[in-house]
Amino acid sequence: MTGTTSPRDRLIVALDLPSVAQARAMIETLGDAVSFYKIGMELTYSGGLPLAEELVRAGKKVFLDLKLHDIPNTVARATEQVAHLGATFLTIHAYPQTMKAARQALGNSPLKLLAVTVMTSYDDNDLREAGFALGVKDLVARRAQQAKEAGVHGLILSAEEAAGMRAALGPDMLLVTPGIRPAGADVADQKRVMTPARAIAAGADHLVIGRPVTQAADPKAAAEAIVAEIAAARAP
Ligand code: C5P
């Protein structure tokens, strides 16, 4: 749990931008308002890893959303490399072999692993088509438990699932939730959304927010407003 984490560090701004130049301009605009950034696959494949290191050197925190999944040896070796970049969070898929390999490879690194249980684009039919016997709800619960057993530090999940997972997994599992929209913000392609205050009340430790900040008329003011809402929110 992040009881001592500042409200600012609980906001993670998703840098879903096509180039490092655009990401750098956004980081400049946001200035001190934002302390934690998520770099996903799009930006990673267009020069985002050196940017991640640059951010760490500048005192920012970085979440590398790389969703690792491969044979254990490859996952372990990739995790060792990511650990050198200085990031705070790395995502992996919640397969037992993958989670155990990544956890063991961390050694004494302060890098924390977040497991993606079931992609939110999947429903029960998609899982069946892919050969799974369990539906979404049961598979998420099983993988969350396996993540805890593997010593994985946290989960990516929707805010709607946060309260149930907090109750099932206890206070130490980090819960990181995308799909957050401040009241009145454009929902865009997100379907199940929650406001920052409600997500914190549901037990989320960190909120991943992209477009409501990066596409706001005044991104810095939008980020400041979200941090203020987090600060005023009542944790469970
Ligand atoms: O712009 P928006 O706030 O919707 O961005 C949310 C971020 O969280 C994006 O980077 C998206 O890829 C990520 N994400 C998500 N839903 C998930 C997992 C990750 O929206 N289930």
Image: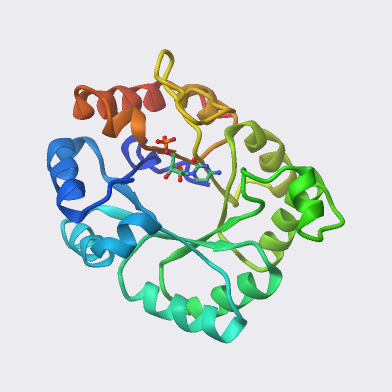
Asked if one can make out residue 63 in the rendered structure from this viewpoint, the answer is: no
Q: Position of residue 163 (x, y in %)?
A: 66, 34
Residue drawn at (34%, 63%), measured in percent from left and top?
87
Colour mode of the rendering: rainbow
Quadrant in which the C terminus is drawn: top right
Query: Front-most of 173 and 188?
Result: 188
Question: Horizontal placement of 88 versus 236: left or right?
Answer: left
On screen, residue 36 versus residue 33, left or right, reads right
Give above or below for 30 relative to 53.
Answer: above
95 on left or right of 154: right
Q: Position of residue 24 (x, y in %)?
A: 16, 49
Residue 197 in the image, given as x and y percentages of width and height: 47, 23
Q: Position of residue 222 (x, y in %)?
A: 27, 24
| Residue 8 lies in quadrant | top left
Q: How many marks?
A: 0
Quarter of image, res 32: top left
**Residue sitting at x 62%, y 44%:** 121
> What residue occupies the far top of the structure in this picture?
184
Please give the name of the residue rendered at 39% of the width and 18% of the height, measured from the top-left corner: 185
Which residue is outermost to the bottom?
Answer: 73
Front residue of this view, candidates 135 and 27: 135
Residue 133 visible at all: yes
Residue furthest to the right in view is 133
Foreground pick, 42 / 115: 42
Going 69% across and 42% down the picture, which residue do you hit? 165
